[in-house]
Image: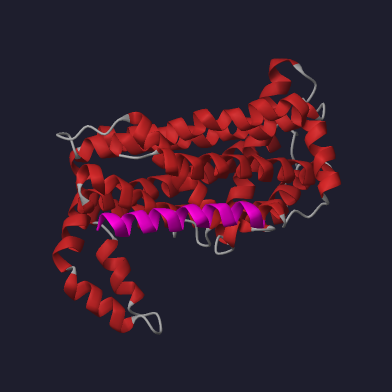
Amino acid sequence: MKWTKQRLNNLFFLLGVAAVVVMLFTFDVSFVELWQHLCHAGYWLIPIVGVWIFIYGMNALSWQTIIRSKCKEVKVGFWRIYRLTITGYALNYATPVGGLGGEPYRIMELSKDIGNQRATSSVILYAMMHFFAHFWYWFSSIFIYLALAAVGDLPINTAIGTLLGIVIIFCLIAFYIFSKGYRHGLVTKVIRWLGHVPGLRKWSARFQENHAEALHNIDEQIAALYAEDKRAFYRSLLLEYLSRVVQSSEVMFMLLLFGIDCGGGFSGLLITFLHSFLIVSFTTLFANLIGFLPMQLGVQEGGFVLSIAALGLSAALGIFVSIICRVREIIWILIGILLMKIDKN
C-alpha cells in the first residue's frame, strides 16, 4: 500500500509538471508580449501573487475547522493542512472538472492522519463548502451590482435585469440542493445517480454493493457537521466566503496599476474594490459553468475580458488581467507541486 501511494504521489507530481508546461505554451500572446506584460506589472506582482498566501491560509483554516469538528481526538497541524490545501488546488488547476486531481490527493494524504473514511468525508465536506461559498459570493454580487446601479455607477436594463434574475434563481436552486446534502449526505445519491449515465450502470451497482457500509458512514459524517456542530459549519463557510472577498483585491491591484481608482480617496477605492468583486464573481461563475476544460483554458481569459468590458473598461485591460492571473496560477502550481515532495508525513 505504501508503494502504491508513492506511485500515486509521483503521478500527481508529473501531472502538475505537465500542467505547467501546457499552460506556458497556451498563452494567447507571444513570450515577448508576455514579458512586456510582466514588466508592466513590475513590483505589483508581489502583492498580486502574495495575497494568495492569505487566501490559501483562509481556505486551510476552513478545512481545518471541518477536520477538527469531525476528529476531535486527532490533531492535524495547520501547516500540514496548509500544504495539502495549496497542492490540492494546484492539482485542481491541472485537471478537467477540477477535483479529479486535488481531492483524491488530499484524501490519500489525509488518510494517513485520520483514516480513509473520515478523510474522505472531510475532503468532500470541504469541497462542498468551497462551492457553497461560491454560490453565496455570486448571490451577494447581484445585490452589489444593484446597489452600484442605484447610485448610477453601473448600467441597468432589461437584458441585465433578466441575467441577474437567472443568476438569483440558479443560486437559490443550489442553496436548496446543498441544504439537502448537508442534512442527509449525498455520496450514496451521487453514486446512484451515476448509475444512470450510459456505461456506468454496472460500475455504480458494483460500487454500491462493495462499499455500502463505507458510503453510509461517509454520508452520516457529512450530515453530522451541520446537525451537531453548526458553529464549525458557519465558521468554515464564513472563512471560505471571506477568501473570495480577499481574492477580489488581486484584481483591484491590477486596476490600480492602470490608474483606475474611481476618483481616488476612500470612496473611490471602495468602488474600485466593489468593481473587482464583480469582475471576479462573473469570471468565476463563467469559468465554473464551463469547468470541464483542463485549467479552464480560454474560459478564464474570456470571462475576465467580458466582465471587465461589461463595467465599461477596455478589453486590453481584461487581457492584461487574465494574463497576469495565469502567471500567478503557474507560480502557485509550481509551489504546490514542490510542496508535494516536501510534505512527507
Residue 58 point in image, percent of width and height? 44, 31
- Foreground residue among 46 and 17: 17
Quarter of the C terminus within the rendering: top left
Residue 118 point in image, percent of width and height? 22, 49
Residue occupying the point 38% across, 58% down = 8
Outermost residue toward the top?
265
User: In this rendering, is residue 276 above or below 165?
Assistant: above
Which secondary structure type mostly characterizes the magenta part of the structure?
Answer: helix
Outermost residue toward the front?
3
Q: Is residue 202 visible?
A: yes
Residue occupying the point 73% across, 45% down = 323
Quarter assignment of residue 129: top left
**Residue 15 is covered by the magenta coloring:** yes
Residue 296 point in image, percent of width and height? 61, 57
Residue range of the region highlighted in magenta in the rendering: 1-22
Report the colour scheme. secondary structure
User: In this rendering, is residue 2 above or below 330?
Assistant: below
Residue occupying the point 24% across, 50% down = 222
- Foreground residue among 8 and 291: 8
Instruction: Please count the marks in the image.
Output: 0
Q: Is residue 180 visible?
A: no
Quarter of the N terminus within the rendering: bottom left
**Residue 167 is covered by the magenta coloring:** no
- Foreground residue among 105 and 267: 105
Residue 234 point in image, percent of width and height? 33, 35
Residue occupying the point 78% across, 46% down = 319
Q: Is residue 152 left or right of residue 223?
A: right
User: In this rendering, is residue 163 above or below 242?
Assistant: below
Q: Is residue 250 left or right of residue 210?
A: right
